[in-house]
Each structure stands twice: as C-alpha cells, then as structure tokens.
Image: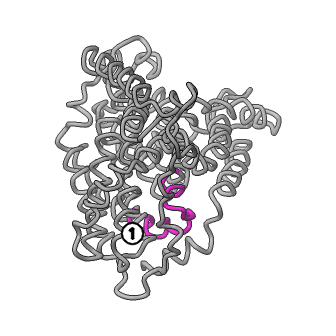
Amino acid sequence: MIKFCVRLVQRWLPEPFIFAILLTFVAALVAMPLCHQTPLEVVEHWGGGVWNLLAFAMQMALVLVCGSTLAAAPVVKRAIDAMARLPKSAPAAIALVTVVSAIACWLNWGFGLIVGVVFAKAIARQRSDVDYRLLIASAYSGFVVWHAGISGSIPLTMATPGESLAMATNGALTDPVPLVQTVFDWHNLLTVLLAIVGITVANTLMHPKQGILTIDPALLKDDEHITNVVSSPAKTPAQRLEHSKLLSWLVALMLIAYLVIHIGLRGAGLDLGGVIMIFLALGLLLHSTPVDYVRAFGKATTGAAGIILQFPFYAGIMGIITGIGASGISLGGVMAEACIRISNPVTYPLLTFLCAAVLNMFVPSGGGHWAVQAPIMFTAGANLGVDPGLTGMAISWGDAWTNLIQPFWALPALAIARLDAKDIMGYCLIDLLVTGVIICAGLLVWAM
C-alpha cells in the first residue's frame, strides 16, 4: 500500500505550478455548466481574483524567509542540532518530528510549518539511517491539525463579536461562539489527540527497513555563516552602522514592545503577522550584526520563489469558485447546496467536512472557505438544529485535511527541504486516509 501510494504520486503528481494551472482549468470547466456561466464570465472572475492574495502571499513569503534566517543564526543552529541528537533510532526520529510539528502547528500554524521542517532537516544531518523524504513528509503531516488549533482562522472569526459575523453568516450567527465551544470542546481536543497519535504511528510504520533514500549532501548542508566582507575593523561611518549591534537591538526591541502591547495588553491573538515579527526580532538579536542578517536573509529568499509564482493562480481559482455571474450562483454555492440537500442533523457535520475538503483543493485558504461556506452552511445548520460550533469545526477540519495532498501549503516546507511535492505526497496520502477515518468518527460522535 505504501509503495503503491508513493509510486502513484511520483508518477502522476506534476510540479506544484503545473498542478495549480490544471486546477484552474478544472474549476473553469466545471463552473461553466454547473453555474450557467459563459467563458467570458469565468475569465473575468479568474482575472478579478488573481491579485486578491497579494498581502497573504507576502506574509507567507516572510514567514518562510524570516523563519529560515532565524534558523541560520549560529546559536539557533546549535540548539536545533542538540535536539536533533535526542532520537536514538530512525523510527524514533520520525515519531519525534511528527509530534513536534503537530504540536507546533496546533499552537500556531505559521510557526509549526517552519519549525517542523527545520527540525527534520537537522535530524537528517545527524542520522544517515532515516529516510529523508518520509522525514520531511512527517514534518508536514502535523499541519493537518492546524485549523483545529488556537490559530485557526474560522474558530477565531466565530469568536470575534461584531456585525461582520452576522453579515458573513446571513444572520445565522448574531452572537460570537467562544473557543470553548469550538477549539477547546472536548470532542475537538480528543479528535486532535487521536489524529496526532494516528499520523505518528502511521509515519513510524512507513519507515522502510531497507532501500532508504540516498540523500545528496547538498540538500542537507546549510549555507555557511556569512562573514563580513570587511575583515579589518569598520572605519567609515557607513561600515560602523552596518556592524552596529545597537541598531539590531533597537529594532528588535520595537518589535517586541509592539507585540507585548498588542497581544499582552490589548488581548489580541497571535496572528501570522505576529509570528513574522517574532522571527524577525529574534533573527536580528541572534545574528552578529545587521549586515550579517541582511546577507542571511538574502540567501533565504530564493526559497520563496514558488510562493510568489503560485499564489496569484490560487487567488484566481478562488475568484472562479466564488464568482457569481448572471445566473446568480457560484460554484462554491452549488457545492454547498448539494451537501445540504442530502444531509440530516447527524450526517450534516460529516458532509460539511467532506464538502470543505473538496473545496480546499481549489481554495486552500481558511478565509476563502469562510467566504464561500459561511453564508450557506451556518444557515442550513441552524435549520437542522446543528450546534454552530460543530458546523464551524467541520468546515475547519475539511479545510485542513486535504492540505495533506494539496501542494499549496507544502511550498515553504519543500523550499527549506529542497524537495519536490511528489517526494512527500505519497506518504501524506497514507496520512490522509488515517486521519480521514479519525476526523469523520470524531464529527459523528460530536453530532450524536
């Protein structure tokens, strides 16, 4: 089964950019007959959506680059290498990476997405008996629990009071739904725990006893710490500024002060921008000088190429999915309505989850899911008597589940690991099957 999935993905999964192009054409060809839209309408929806993820794309690129730059700091590298020596066998290494990644992703998805793969790469440098592809797949597999965690965009949106909540749900939700009824509900916490156990066991059992992938040493070698071009003490005012630790400390202090005010005093959550600020502040503090940080940052930017190229295409796909033509319906709305027509109070959360999972292949964004499904699913759930917290978490789990086979979110991890999507998605397909059973069972129990 494992070999079949790995070979299937390696044979049929194209490069992520090609995958995005194919999804664009599939969405367009499906939208025209189902939504009675003309080719011109579909093209207009696509073009109108292309630039809608620019801010998010910049955030994702900065998460990758700032996280990688922080990991390149000498003191951080030494700490990670020390932790990487903890596992005493290859299966133990796989298990440790999976658990660390999953917990980190549950706490904050942006943090977990980078920390897991950096830790995995450090372990690969320590152990030659661990399969590198499976190790990176294990680091990415922890991402499946992110939207059931405390940084999940849909649960956080549901917990935020204001008129926008009622508007987004067509009046189905007028009062906020606290996190204790979504993320911290015992049904969700138990599902998260079982999902983490499931992928940990699955990843460990998938490790081959022989035939381990031979790794090109260049994949594991980090760029050497960049020394200053000027070997003699800085003499000019410009050189003294470039090598002034005080400037780095002052900027880092400003970033930390803002986070303390924003999160500690005003009670705001740690969002993606906050994670970037933490990475940036720590990176400035731990690199020797400002110019060292600049040079390390420059080397890390090469890994962001896939994000910069592909995010506009996925934004265009979102435009097709959410675009409403003269017919008055959208493709996302058609999918949601089809789910509702065959639902009852017990099966509704499960079918909502599956609808979100399919939609996630085309709209891999929590915010996109909220825009497409919230106006329809919460109204239908209320009519069926389904708890709104359960409806929201069903959408959240669906959004996260198929990320295991959607290369969109794997781009930062793949950039750091220097692998292709087809190298890890075969293993992630097994994790998809394992977690699918667990999540479906958890939603059914919650609904009863």
Residue 196: x and y, percent? 26, 57
Q: Is residue 208 above or below residue 325?
A: below
Check the image and tell me how it is coloured: one colour
Q: Residue furthest left?
A: 186
Eyeballing the image, is 211 above or below 162? below
Magenta stretch mostly in which secondary structure?
A: helix
Pick the quarter of the image with the N terminus.
Answer: bottom left
434 is higher (above) or lower (below) than 311: below
Which residues make up the magenta segment? 412-431
Per the image, the residue denoted by label 1 is 125
Q: Residue at x 50, y 54 (%)?
A: 410
Q: Is residue 234 magenta?
A: no
Q: How many marks?
A: 1
Tell me the quarter of the picture where residue 275 sits: top left
- Name the residue located 45 percent from the left edge and 66 percent from the top edge: 429
Q: Is residue 336 visible?
A: no
Quadrant holding the C terminus:
top left
Give the quadrant of residue 91.
Answer: bottom left
Tag 1 secondary structure: helix
Position of residue 158 measured from the top left corner of the image (x, y, whole percent)? 35, 25
Q: Residues within 10 Å of mark 1 (few under 14, many from 20)?
A: some
| Residue at 40% over, 40% down | 395
Question: Is residue 76 shown to the viewer in this render?
Answer: yes
Per the image, is 425 magenta?
A: yes
Q: Residue 227: x and y, percent?
A: 50, 49
Vertical arrangement, residue 29 with respect to residue 129, above or below: above
339 sits left or right of 444 in the view: right
Residue 204, given in percent of the width and then of the height, sits at 29, 72
> Of the residues shown, which amino acid type is indicated by label 1?
Arg
Q: Nearer the viewer, residue 324 or 281?
A: 281
User: 1 or 443, which lies in front?
Assistant: 1
